[in-house]
């Protein structure tokens, strides 16, 4: 897909990035521009394919050395750079967990924990909430009617979604029925929800990275909660009609295991 300098205006999902990242190029921003605008306060810099090849190592090993391989004119990697900018602590933590497994088992041995880390890195959604016990049972039970209709006023007020997975932003360039995030719940104080958006990200990043580090979440099977992104109030115009949530192929009932 060609570069779109107005990508944050394509829909409400991408609009979440509006005003947060200093990218206003009328063409694909080169790596030098991403490094100048985004990486000044990061523990990493973005490198091209040629530099990556010269390193002679794997992706996670390059990141552990402070270098993130980033393909030119590529939406997936562009959004990956933006997530580094917004969540530097959590991204660095995920890399460290990858490296722990690589150093103990070797690069060729792909552990289940590394698969779960990658799944969150690509498709992760963070739900910032004041009390997880209010929303967690609804997510576990796939109670979409309660979650999105009966509790609709909570969304945007004190149930706030933040995309972490850069693949989700790439998919949001052309949204489709089936677009789903894999959520982690993060409890935040009441004052958090009243802050300007740009002030929420550093606080959320710090809380998320600490929570993931101490909970050993990715050591457990199936640690993430699916959330149909187009069902989130305010994120897709069709969900203003309650009938939208009757699509059981998208809003799937919980499986009996």
Image (cartoon, helix red, strand yellow):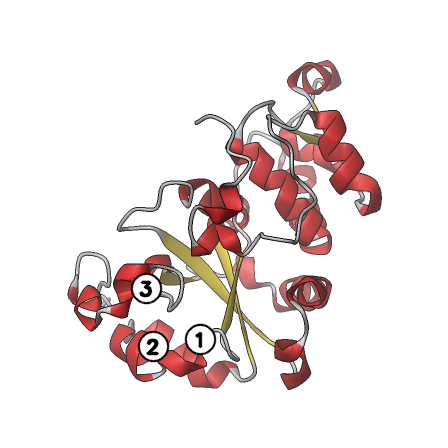
For the residues marked 3 and 1, what is the alpha-carbon distance in whole angstroms? 11 Å
Position of the C terminus by quadrant: bottom left
Q: Nearer the viewer, residue 176 or 100?
A: 176
Marker disc for residue 252:
none
Marker disc for residue 147:
2
Q: As drawn, is 182 to the left or to the right of 245?
A: right
- Position in image of residue 166 (x %, y %): 53, 44
Is residue 44 in sight in this rendering?
no
* SS at mark 2 in the image: helix
Asked whether the residues under the numbered discs 3 and 2 touch, taking CB atoms below 8 Å apart as contact, a structural biologist would say yes
- Position in image of residue 65 (x %, y %): 79, 34
Q: Which residue is mark 3?
A: 231
For the residues marked 3 and 2, what is the alpha-carbon distance in whole angstroms? 9 Å
Q: Relative to residue 79, is residue 254 depicted above or below? A: below
Is residue 254 in sight in this rendering?
yes
* SS at mark 3 in the image: helix
- Give the quadrant of residue 243: bottom left
Circle nearer the N terminus (1, 2): 2
Circle nearer the N terminus (3, 1): 1
For the residues marked 1 and 2, what is the alpha-carbon distance in whole angstroms? 9 Å
Circle nearer the N terminus (3, 2): 2
Position of the N terminus by quadrant: top left
Q: Relative to residue 188, is residue 222 depicted above or below? A: above
Q: For mark 1, does the 10 Å Cα neighbourhood hold few (<14), some (14 to 19), or many (20 or more) residues?
A: some
Q: For mark 3, does the 10 Å Cα neighbourhood hold few (<14), some (14 to 19), or many (20 or more) residues?
A: many
Q: Nearer the viewer, residue 77 or 255?
A: 77
What residue is rendered at 55% in x and 53% in y? 164
Choose mark 1 or mark 2, whichever is in front: 1
What residue is rendered at 28% in x and 76% in y? 143
Q: Which residue is mark 1?
A: 155
- Position in image of residue 3 (x %, y %): 52, 29
């Amino acid at each position: 897909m060609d570069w779109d300098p107005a990508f944050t205006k394509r829909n409400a999902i991408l609009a979440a990035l509006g005003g947060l990242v200093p990218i206003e190029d009328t063409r694909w921003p080169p790596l030098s521009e991403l490094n100048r605008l985004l990486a000044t306060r990061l523990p990493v810099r973005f490198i091209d394919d040629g530099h990556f090849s010269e390193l002679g190592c794997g992706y996670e090993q390059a990141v552990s050395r402070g270098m993130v391989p980033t393909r030119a004119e590529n939406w997936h990697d562009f959004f990956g750079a933006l997530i580094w900018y917004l969540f530097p602590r959590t991204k660095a933590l995920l890399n460290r967990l990858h490296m722990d497994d690589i150093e103990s088992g070797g690069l060729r041995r792909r552990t289940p924990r590394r698969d779960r880390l990658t799944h969150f890195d690509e498709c992760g959604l963070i739900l910032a909430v004041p009390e997880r016990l209010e929303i967690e049972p609804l997510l576990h039970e796939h109670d979409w009617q309660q979650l999105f209709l009966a509790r609709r006023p909570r969304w945007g007020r004190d149930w706030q979604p933040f995309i972490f997975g850069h693949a989700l932003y790439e998919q949001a360039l052309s949204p489709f029925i089936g677009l789903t995030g894999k959520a982690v719940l993060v409890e935040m104080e009441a004052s958090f929800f009243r802050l300007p958006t740009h002030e929420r990200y550093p606080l959320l990043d710090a809380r998320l990275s600490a929570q993931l580090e101490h909970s050993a979440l990715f050591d457990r099977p199936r640690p993430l909660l699916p959330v149909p992104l187009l069902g989130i109030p305010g994120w897709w115009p069709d969900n203003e009609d309650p009938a939208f949530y009757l699509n059981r192929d998208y809003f799937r009932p919980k499986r009996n295991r």
